[in-house]
Image (cartoon, grey):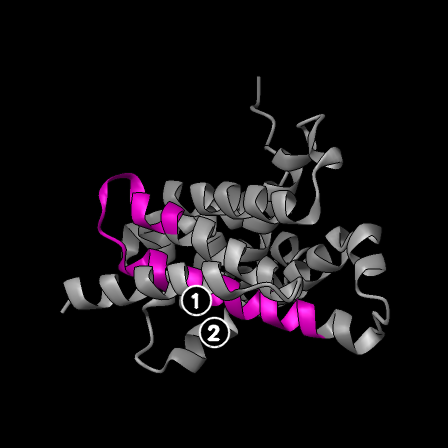
Amino acid sequence: MATKKSTITREKIVSMYMDYTLENNDKPKSVYDFTKMNNFTEAEFYNFFGTIESVEKEVFKMFLEKTVELLQKDQDYETYDMKSKMLSFYFTFFELLSANRSYVTMSLKQHHNELKNLILLSSLRSSFKNYVVGIISDEYRIKQEKFQNFQEKAVQETSWIQLLLTLKFWLEDSSPAFEKTDLYIEKSIKATFELMNITPLDSLIDFGKFIFKEKIHNK
């Protein structure tokens, strides 16, 4: 009896791409090589992706999608305020990255030009900004009496920059279980939300001391 061929999905292609990259210490040279090695057709590949580069970008977007999926399984998540949702997002997101650290590190350090590495995060950027808009609470909007569209965009962009800075810190973190990254997340999120509430001083000083200490010790 012939074995039924497994159905190709977006998730399977991404998983095969990550495995290929880690096993060969390089990304596939072409769609032809990639599909031949993994025993599926180019036509099946093109049902989901237009290029190898688009798969590369999809990896980070899927990390975000999985993060949100896990968060929404927690019945208490929807009752959290905006700050607690963001903290939950960060801890879950970086837990997923840590579980795939070999791939993430290889992928984000493949170019000496950091701008080229950032291109890989373009899909993640769009999805993360949508997530941020989704958790801006009515309570926060009421607090900021004249909350306008440009302020919403400012929150999105600020949050994205913060995520990039945290990602950079995590990539350089050599502490056990990345405990320094956890501390970085707690302090940076607290400082950011106090800035948004116009009462930043204590948390900003605390966060500044933490960053200064880390930079001195790492020299």
Q: Amino acid at mark 2?
A: Leu
Q: Nearer the viewer, mark 1 or mark 2?
A: 1
Spatial CA span between label 1 and label 2: 12 Å
Q: Residue furthest top?
A: 1
Identity of the residue drawn at 43% across and 47% down: 97
Residue 77, percent from left and from top: 69, 34
Q: How many labels sit on residues?
A: 2
Q: Which residue is mark 2?
A: 118
Residue 47, percent from left and from top: 70, 56
Quadrant housing the C terminus? bottom left
Q: Which residue is mark 1?
A: 165
Residue 158 lies within the magenta run:
yes
Query: Relative to the observer, which residue lies in front, 57 or 95?
Result: 95
Query: Relative to the observer, which residue lies in front, 131 or 204?
Result: 204
- State the predominant SS element of the stretch in magenta: helix
**Circle 2 — which element?**
helix
Is residue 178 toward the left or the right of residue 3 in the image? Answer: left
Q: Quadrant of residue 195?
A: bottom right
Q: Quadrant of residue 108?
A: bottom left
Query: Magenta stretch?
Result: 154-183
Identity of the residue drawn at 53% across and 50% down: 14
Mark 1 touches mark 2? (CB < 8 Å): no
Quadrant housing the N terminus? top right
Identity of the residue drawn at 32% across and 70% down: 110
Residue 182 lies within the magenta run:
yes
Residue 8, percent from left and from top: 62, 42
**Viewer can see residue 159:** yes
Residue 196, percent from left and from top: 65, 64
